[in-house]
Image (cartoon, helix red, strand yellow):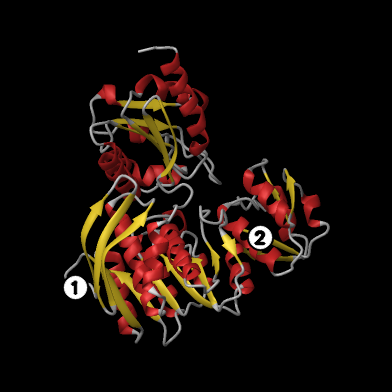
Amino acid sequence: MGIAGAGMSALARLLVNRGVSVSGCEARESSTVTALRAVGAEVLIGHSADHLDNTDTFVYTTAINPSHPEFVAARGSGKRVIRRAAALASVLEDRRCIAISGTHGKTTTTSLLTVAAQACGLDPSFAIGGNLYETGLNAHLGSGELAIIEADESDGSFLLLRPSAAIITNVEADHLENHGDLEGIFRAFEIFVDRLDVDGLLLCCADDPGAVRMAGYARSIGRRVLTYGESAEADVRVTSVVEHSDSVEFDALGSGVSEAGLRVGALVGHHMALNAAAALTLASEFGFDLEKVRTAWANFAGVHRRFELHGIANGVRVYDDYAHHPTEIAASLTAAKAVAGEGRVIAVFQPGTYSRTQTFAREFAESMAIADIAVVMDIFPAREEPIPGVTAALISDQIPLPAEQVVYETNFSETPARIAALARPGDIVITMGIGNVYLLCPEMLRAIADRGAYGRP
């Protein structure tokens, strides 16, 4: 159910690769639906309990509301009902699992490590929360022994994996609707560490207090631990970070790694150097040919919805990013400011879920203030019901910018025209959020182009 979602579509593709008959449903047609049909999955549009008739297993994620009629019918059918994470762990149980976890940076780090393994001819299996530009795929069942998995902590799904090696990029408060509080998140990560092979490796970012705490816990139970980052305490030190408009470059030294001027294409922002350093350290640990890795990363084309350039119109560049947590928004907007140069940054943020908006409204507002113009859209509810009094105005009303630089846009379809009226040559527009805000990018480009074509001010 919800077969075209990032995680579900990856699972569906892996199951088809295994020779399993896969069907699924989705709310609407999309390029992902078309791609799944092309590999042999049956995809129906719309939801119905009738979809259960010719199946023996129903796979779901916690993004589905438990009261949804199709989900209710599945639980009452007597058929096997399992979470996506359990199905993923099952389909890859004969592979040596590398799990990449953390509050931020999972998709990029997983993608870089996958591309590195492919460049070395290892043909890994992988499951990523975004499509690689190199292949257009978010999952693949490889012939090699490795399975490189983006491990989702949001609902505790990562606790179903048994990795041989794992990365923790960072640990912050998020998904509190599932974990309760920050201590609940730490407890989940501790269980994740417990599930690591006794002779496995845990790699943690030395710059993040939460990851450092997990490194200490791992050592206390006898796991081998390495750290990476700009901290003087890191086993692999990241230095000399240079941010370019289309790449990031850095040096990494320590624990078998000695790389100077390593450039990673399509990644923008200081934080991306740390993601790359994590992948580099693990690549070294697994004996990858780092010269081949260096070459592959120099030509890295990026990942969909990670500072993704959609186009340029009338001198305005339009990007999209999956940023949906205050820390991620701050990192993306800081990177955008560096890319914009003398131009302005217009941030278009669609908050995701009422609970996250309620919890982080002040932090979202502070992060959005990095932009020159902050546009806040209505909340994308995902699976949640509205919470009385919780609207995106909780964010827009607290953004510490002059009133004329803050916009609360309640009409989704009017947003492109609004942006076209604001943008001028040299500016960067960046859409952000977990919802459907990215669908506006082509419309924004058309609206900006039309405004320039008609010579409007």
Q: Amino acid at mark 1?
A: Glu
Residue projecting furthest to the left = 232
Please state if 390 lies on the left or on the right of 340 as rendered: right
Dividing the picture into quarters, in which one does residue 197 lie? bottom left
Image spot of residue 277 (x, y percent): 32, 66
Q: Residue at x 34, y 87 (%)?
A: 222
CB atoms of marks 1 and 2 within 8 Å: no
Please state if 419 lies on the left or on the right of 427 as rendered: right
Residue projecting furthest to the right = 53
Q: Residue at x 39, y 63 (%)?
A: 295
Image spot of residue 220 (x, y percent): 31, 83
**Residue assigned mark 1:** 233
Dividing the picture into quarters, in which one does residue 429 lie? top left
Q: Residue at x 74, y 54 (%)?
A: 73
Please state if 121 lies on the left or on the right of 316 as rendered: right
SS under mark 1: loop
**Residue assigned mark 2:** 12
Residue 171 showing in the rendered view: no
Residues packed near mark 2 inside 10 Å, few (<14), some (14 to 19) or many (20 plus): many
Q: Amino acid at mark 2?
A: Ala
In the depicted view, which residue is nearer to us: 53 or 369? 369
Image spot of residue 409 (x, y percent): 42, 26
Query: Which of disc 2 and disc 1 is earlier in sequence?
Result: 2
Q: Quadrant of the C terminus?
A: top left
